[in-house]
Image (cartoon, rainbow, N blue to C red):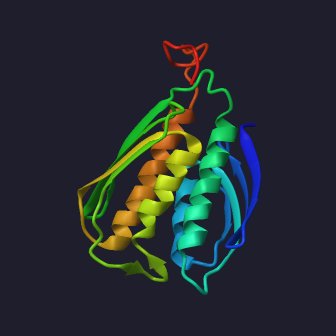
Amino acid sequence: MRNADIRRTTKETDITMKFNLDGSGKAEIATGIGFFDHMLNSFARHGLFDLCVDIHGDLEVDGHHSVEDCGLVLGQAIREAAGDKKGIRRYGYFILPMDEVLVLCAVDLCGRPYFSMDASFPTSCCGDFDTDLVREFFYAVSYSAGMNLHIKVLSPGNSHHMIEAIFKAFAKSLDMAVSYDARITDVLSTKGSL
């Protein structure tokens, strides 16, 4: 099983996470931010990952530290669970529709972090979640995981639909990138390592 079990504690957050790339979509999420819980549940379900997250953060300040630090921990979990990356496709991409919204996501598990996001949300919040934190979360994931991650909203609309489509598209892209291909016997790189 390709999994990771991580604990990260700072003066701002205390996070425990269990992550399994070869799961079935089971999730136990408690971040203290209802909308973020919903997004992480969607990520696990649509990527068919098993994900347990427990966060105690300084929500009396705002959700920024909890969301960003969760991204750092998830990125670390993805990197650890993927291991040496032998036999995996490395690249993943998905175009996901959600009602009026259409989102493109592309992932390269190359070991070199890069993040690009083209999205503008019409509202500043979804429930108790600041929409600015979407960018912070995925930036943290990409850099902590060492992945090249591109997210582009092709057809915008309702903020909730946009954010949920982003999380689901990322899940489907990552699932493709970490899936095995019998034709790949080592790592998919001319350099011999990722």
Residue drawn at the location 72% of the way across and 72% of the way down: 11
Q: Residue furthest front?
A: 11
Residue 37 makes an appearance in the image: no
44 to 100, vertically: above or below = above
Report the side of 4 relative to 169 (left or right): right
Quarter of the N terminus within the rendering: top right
**Picture quadrant of residue 52:** bottom right
| Foreground of the two, 46 or 171 | 171
Query: Where is 124 relative to 97, above or below?
Result: below
Q: Is residue 94 left or right of 90 when viewed as pictured?
A: left
Q: Nearer the viewer, residue 45 or 174?
A: 174
Residue found at the very far bottom of the displayed protein: 60
Give the x, y percent position of residue 179.
Answer: 56, 32
Measured along the vertical axis of the image, is residue 181 above or below residue 34? Answer: above
Can residue 7 be spotted in the picture? yes
Q: Position of residue 156 (x, y in %)?
A: 24, 63
Q: Quadrant of residue 60?
A: bottom right
Point 42% across, 50% down: residue? 169
Q: Residue furthest left?
A: 155
Tell me which residue sits at (49%, 83%) in the image: 128
Asked if residue 58 is positioned above or below residue 138 in the image, the reply reads below
